[in-house]
Each structure stands twice: as C-alpha cells, then as structure tokens.
Image: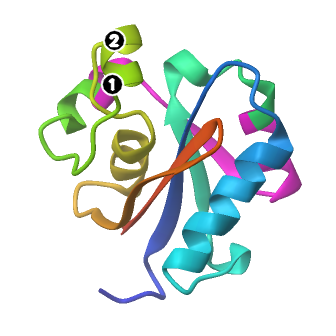
Amino acid sequence: MDLGEAVIVAGIGCRRNASAAQVLAAVDAALTKVARSRSDLSILATAEVKREEAGIVDAARTLSLGLVIVPMPAIEAQSRYVETRSATAEWRFGVPSIAEASARSAAGPAAEILLPRLVCGNVTCALAIGRP
C-alpha cells in the first residue's frame, strides 16, 4: 500500500467519562506497539454511541486531528471482520467491537488492521490503515 495516499486511523472505545489523558495514553501505547508516532496518525474515529465522550473529543483536538463519528449500522457491518471482541461492547451495544470496527470503517473499504484492540485502562484503541 502506498503510504503517501494512505491514512492511519485510531479507533477509540472507552468507558464512560474517560479523560483525554487516558485516550491519549491508549493512542500512544497503540502507536508504540506498531513502531509509529502521533505524526503518522491521520484520524481518530469512534462509534456514534461515544460521540458525546469529552475525552475522545478533547484528544482529537489535542492531536489536531479530525474525529470521524461512525454510525452504528457501519459498526455492525464491520462486526464480522473484527479480530477481537469486547464483552462490554457486546452487552451494551450489541456489537463485538467499538475501537476496531470504528478504525476499519473510517479507514475505508480496503482497510487493513495494523493493531487489533489494545486495552489501556478505561480506553481501547485499534489502528487501521487504508484509503477512506
């Protein structure tokens, strides 16, 4: 994949009221796992059920990145492709993943997962690369 045209998306899931610092710590941990840095990141993404989470919104602002809000039907459509499952996401929202499905959806139809869901305290982060 030509990285000049590609985007790297951090999909974010979290427990209610997670802070921006917690979101940023999860993003940094995920990027470190794949030998990348914040400057490689193109977009943050989350499911519409998390759109009001100030920690996610503030983290995107801190990183000077756009925040893609993924509709729940798009999250559900990604469910058969996710590599990891969250019992909490399944119980609360009826989907196996918020972070990974958000990353895949925002990265576009040719998305590849760089890092499946990484749990970091109250936040989950998954990284996808693709062309939106």
What residue is shown at x 82% (from left), y 41% (from top)? 20
**Residues packed near mark 2 inside 10 Å, few (<14), some (14 to 19) or many (20 plus):** few
Q: Quick check: can you spot residue 111? A: yes
Q: Is residue 29 left or right of residue 4?
A: right
| Image location of residue 28, percent across then percent down | 69, 66
Residue numbers of the magenta segment: 56-75
Q: Which residue is mark 2?
A: 91
- 116 above or below 18? below
Q: Secondary structure at mark 1?
A: helix
Q: Quadrant of the C terminus?
A: bottom left
| Image location of residue 119, percent across then percent down | 52, 48
Please name the amino acid that badge 2 sits on: Trp
Please name the amino acid that badge 1 sits on: Ala
Q: Please identify the quarter of the rendering in which residue 40 is found.
A: bottom right
What residue is shown at x 52% (from left), y 16% (from top)? 49
**Foreground pick, 46 / 107:** 46
- 104 above or below 16? below
Q: Quadrant of the N terminus?
A: bottom left
- 19 above or below 113? above
Q: Is residue 103 left or right of residue 61?
A: left
Q: Which residue is mark 1?
A: 87
Cα separation between marks 2 and 1 = 6 Å
| Image location of residue 65, percent across then percent down | 73, 56
**Foreground pick, 121 / 114:** 121
